[in-house]
Amino acid sequence: MVAYIIRRLVFTGLIAFLAVSAVFFIIRMTGDPTYLMVPMDASQAVIDNFRHKMGFDKPLFFQYLDYIWNFVHGDLGTSLRYNEPALDLVLEALPATALLTFSAMAMSILIGIPLGIITGIRSGGIDRLITALVVLAQGVPNFWLGLMMIFIFSVKFHLLPTGGTGSIKHLIMPTIVLGFYTTSRITRLTKSSVSEHFQKEYIQTARAKGLRESTVLLKHCVRNALMPVVTLVGLSIGVYMGGVVITETIFSWPGMGRLIVQSIEMRDFPVVIAAVSFIVVVFSFINLITDIAYAWIDPRIRYD
């Protein structure tokens, strides 16, 4: 296990390096941000001085080498817009995104897994109804759901704020919108996995030993059936951390997704690269935790 973790950490570092490099060149290809940073009536001397100060007058390859050198030494650059360390801006936005991410994931787990178990062990009207609703939920776009919720609960009935932060009420709609799709995925995956394991021979053996049905279901069936669900949950958390752009934009949520969008619009290269680098590391770390969790759920799994 220790050797496996070390290999994964090395692999994570390689992936982070490649991702940072790719984002660096892609962002640089969008154009020179100099003219967005200086006043419209700035003289050519002022423009040239700014480009020299920021290093934009160097060939692209040398800009890349400078960035990698600074990155290795823990310097992710300074925001062109706010004149603050880029990593500090990312870390300031992290708590808002983390709160939204884990609240949405908690909703998905607390709703999706019980619904999946119920529909996986039963057949009939409730099974078909829940399955139909889940399939319908997977086809609802996040932006449409967000706009409809704002119209109904904020504009029409004045029950919830349209956006921002400050109270539990501000968190309700973004959480539902962000977790809506994942809730339906977890429900469907749990249902199919529980239904498959519920018919296997070891379940029949457990019943033959005289174990209570609740013990057979929870200790034997559900624990084994949760293997693919753990994968989905782990991947979803990583996706949430980097994919909350639409939700945060709709509800003016001051998180990393909104920060990335604003930085791209302003061509604030250091902030974009710092945010993407952070997301890559978090996503890889969560995948590592997910793999380790397999061994806890199923003792038969070992990493050599």
Image (spheres, rainbow, N blue to C red):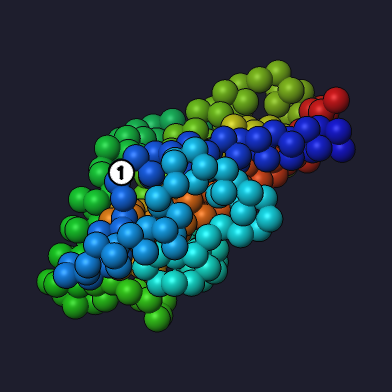
Q: Secondary structure at mark 1?
A: loop
Mark yes or no: residue 196 visible: yes
The residue depicted at 81 percent of the width and 28 percent of the height is: 303
Residue that mark 1 sits on? 30
Q: Nearer the viewer, residue 252 or 156?
A: 252
x, y (%) of residue 101? 48, 58
The residue depicted at 32 percent of the width and 35 percent of the height is: 135
Looking at the rendered structure, the kind of residue marked 1 is Thr
Q: Quadrant of residue 174?
A: bottom left
Residue 222 falls left or right of residue 117:
right
Q: Nearer the viewer, residue 78 or 220?
A: 78
Which quarter of the image is occupied by the C terminus?
Answer: top right
229 above or below 279? above
Residue 273 falls left or right of residue 267:
right
78 above or below 212? below
Q: Nearer the viewer, residue 242 or 178?
A: 242
**How many numbered circles are shown?**
1
Q: Quadrant of residue 181?
A: top left
x, y (%) of residue 77? 53, 60
Seen from this angle, which residue lies furthest left?
156
The residue depicted at 61 percent of the width and 21 percent of the height is: 199
x, y (%) of residue 254? 39, 69
Mark yes or no: residue 115 visible: no
Residue 174 falls left or right of residue 302:
left
Which quarter of the image is occupied by the N terminus?
Answer: top right
133 above or below 147? above
x, y (%) of residue 214? 67, 43
The residue depicted at 70 percent of the width and 26 percent of the height is: 203
